[in-house]
Image (tube, rainbow, N blue to C red):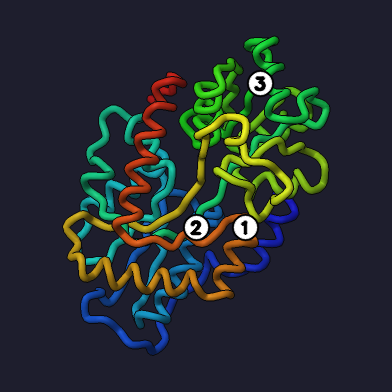
């Protein structure tokens, strides 16, 4: 675990164990007495921490118990299916992210359609990935990397945390748009991928900013570009990849959704409460400590965002040939 991530987890010490017991607040009759945030990944990750952070604020604002429920499996599909089948009253929320947009194409026989069956409620946070290389790699810019890749097709090993992950498909999208060829090397998680990247057995990786920033700052990895459309506040000196590959943009994001039949009034109450929480300096600063930014959107804006992300990832999945068993 890199230094920044340790600092962030220390900042949020106890988050995974927060009982989330409500304190008095003005409750809205449209919101159930207990709110469950279903997270498709184990406790302790950034997505889990962000859900607990926003859950603690929601309980204060709404006077409701908030319970974070980790249901792992099938890259978030187990959690999503549980929410799709839940009572549509705003009491069960899915912590959504890029995996939901990716899975729509990656998995051929899902028992649900995320866009059809889930109504987006509110964003939590978003941040780019970072194109990083081993410091000994000869290319020191995106332009030099593209030139090297074209002169040496198939000789760049691109590490990722696994097939079908955001990191894998961010690389596939880059290859498609830059018209270069690299060898995808999937690992069982980010940690072993980092080991081989820093040892020189892999040359390049698209890495979530929260995982990469400590290695970049201590010189163990070199950042060539961020995948946001413009330079990112956490690494302001690193250019956007879109400068060289126009139109390229990949954002890691976390948001809340609920069953589609949930009343619009209930969604509006939850959206207002989440957005007010994200506007609080204390919460915004904790999110920025992760290298991300608060994601304040209306439900309609978020629906459009997820639809566009799903369409983008469909192209990347098909180009990459990624498959799951």
Q: Is residue 187 above or below residue 10?
A: above
Is the residue marked by circle 3 packed among few (<14), some (14-19), or many (20+) residues within 10 Å? many
Q: Residue at x 69, y 10 (%)?
A: 152
Look at mark 3 in the image and give the residue it sits on.
146
Is label 3 in contact with label 2 (beta carbons under 8 Å)? no
Is label 1 in contact with label 2 (beta carbons under 8 Å)? yes
Secondary structure under tag 2 reads: strand
Q: Residue at x 46, y 49 (%)?
A: 41
Q: Disc 3 versus disc 1: distance between alpha carbons?
A: 29 Å
Look at mark 1 in the image and give the residue it sits on.
290
User: Considering only order in the chain, which callout, 2 or 3, is on the residue closer to the N terminus?
Assistant: 2
Q: Position of residue 222 (x, y in %)?
A: 76, 37
User: Considering only order in the chain, which callout, 1 or 3, is on the residue closer to the N terminus?
Assistant: 3
Is the residue marked by circle 2 packed among few (<14), some (14-19), or many (20+) residues within 10 Å? many
Secondary structure under tag 3 reads: helix
Quadrant of the rendered image containing residue 241: top right
Question: Which residue is at the front of the view, 52 or 117?
Answer: 117
Q: Position of residue 238 (x, y in %)?
A: 71, 44
Q: Disc 3 versus disc 2: distance between alpha carbons?
A: 31 Å
């Amino acid at each position: 675990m890199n230094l920044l991530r340790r600092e962030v987890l220390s900042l949020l010490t106890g988050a995974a164990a927060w009982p989330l017991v409500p304190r008095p607040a003005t409750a809205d009759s449209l919101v159930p007495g207990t709110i469950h945030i279903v997270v498709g990944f184990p406790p302790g990750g950034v997505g889990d921490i962000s859900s607990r952070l926003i859950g603690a604020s929601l309980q204060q604002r709404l006077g409701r118990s908030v319970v974070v429920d980790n249901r792992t499996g099938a890259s978030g599909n187990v959690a999503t299916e549980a929410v799709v089948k839940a009572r549509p009253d705003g009491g069960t929320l899915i912590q959504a992210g890029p995996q939901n947009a990716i899975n729509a194409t990656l998995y051929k026989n899902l028992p649900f359609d995320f866009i059809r069956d889930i109504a987006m409620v509110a964003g939590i946070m978003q941040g780019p990935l970072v194109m990083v290389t081993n410091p000994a790699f000869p290319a020191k810019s995106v332009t030099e990397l593209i030139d090297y890749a074209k002169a040496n097709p198939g000789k760049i090993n691109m590490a990722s945390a696994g097939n079908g992950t955001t990191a894998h498909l961010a690389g596939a999208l880059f290859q498609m748009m830059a018209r270069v060829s690299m060898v995808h090397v999937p690992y069982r998680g980010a940690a072993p991928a980092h080991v081989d990247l820093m040892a020189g057995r892999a040359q390049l990786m698209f890495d979530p900013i929260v995982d990469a920033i400590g290695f970049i700052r201590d010189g163990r990895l070199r950042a060539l570009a961020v995948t946001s459309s413009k330079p990112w506040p956490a690494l302001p000196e690193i250019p956007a990849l879109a400068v060289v590959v126009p139109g390229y943009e990949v954002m890691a994001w976390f948001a809340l959704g609920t069953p589609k039949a949930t009343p619009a009034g209930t969604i509006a109450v939850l959206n207002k409460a989440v957005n007010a929480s994200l506007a609080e300096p204390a919460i915004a600063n904790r999110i920025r400590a992760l290298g991300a930014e608060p994601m304040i959107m209306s439900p309609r804006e978020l629906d459009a965002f997820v639809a566009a992300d799903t369409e983008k990832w469909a192209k990347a999945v098909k180009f990459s040939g990624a498959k799951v068993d």
